[in-house]
Image (cartoon, rainbow, N blue to C red):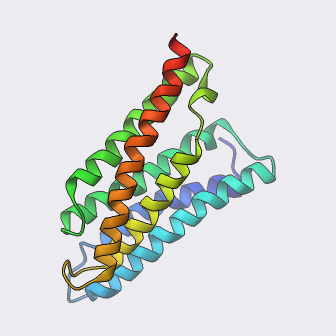
Amino acid sequence: MPWNIPILLTWMRVLLIPVFTILFYLPNTWIQLQTVNWTAAIIFALAAITDWFDGFLARRWKQTSDFGAFLDPVADKLMVAVALLLLVSLGRTYAIFAMIIIGREITISALREWMAQMGKRGSVAVATIGKFKTTAQMIAIFLLLIGTDKYNDPFYLIGNILMFIASVLTIWSMCYYLKMAWKEFK
């Protein structure tokens, strides 16, 4: 396994997941809820930024590797899945959004793996619609990590509107990737 800054950034994202999670299980007497929310949101934002940054550095410094290509999306999907499960358990978003997003991630990851085994990974490469989905999803999760009050908090309202948009884009992008893969089977 190669060791370089892009891979270290990816590992940092993986290691932040338990820290991110534990925050929500600390006793209220140790840390106030608003502090937990903002700390978790900052950790999540840091993970999202390093996701972009490690890929940029790996390409720029020509430090891409098969291991990095494997670990990067795993780290991303783990962080998003954990965040979504926490948000659902806290009552800040709807389970249907989490099911759609996590289900799509598993489906497309499996599809990409299968296509890679057939030597056709490029047919399901990341598309613009997937980038829009990710952007809406990341902003929604960030806002929902901050917001606590369902009825009086604009973060909650805007976060769930963006989560709805992310869910629609999630289904749309999944259909797009499945269509691209289907062409390879004809």
Q: Quadrant of residue 29?
A: bottom left
Task: Tell me what residue is drawn at x 41 percent, y 61 percent.
Answer: 17
Task: Tell me what residue is drawn at x 66 percent, y 57 percent.
Answer: 54
Percent x, y for residue 91?
Answer: 18, 68
Q: Quadrant of residue 35?
A: bottom left
On screen, residue 55 above or below 37: above
Residue 21: in sight, yes or no? Answer: no
Of the pair 126 and 3, the residue shown nearer to us: 126
Percent x, y for residue 15?
Answer: 47, 60
Q: Quadrant of residue 117?
A: top right
Give left or right: position of 45 versus 29: right
Residue 82: in sight, yes or no? Answer: yes
Of the pair 48 and 19, the residue shown nearer to us: 48
On screen, residue 96 above or below 157: above
Give left or right: position of 47 versus 19: right
How many numbered dots are placed on residues in this image? 0
Task: Tell me what residue is drawn at x 33 percent, y 66 percent.
Answer: 161
On screen, residue 133 above or below 42: above
Give left or right: position of 118 versus 37: right
Percent x, y for residue 124?
Answer: 56, 31
Percent x, y for residue 99?
Answer: 26, 47
Task: Tell me what residue is drawn at x 58 percent, y 42 percent.
Answer: 127
Q: Residue furthest right?
A: 61
Give left or right: position of 38 versus 156: right
Question: Where is the N terminus found, in terms of image quarters?
Answer: top right
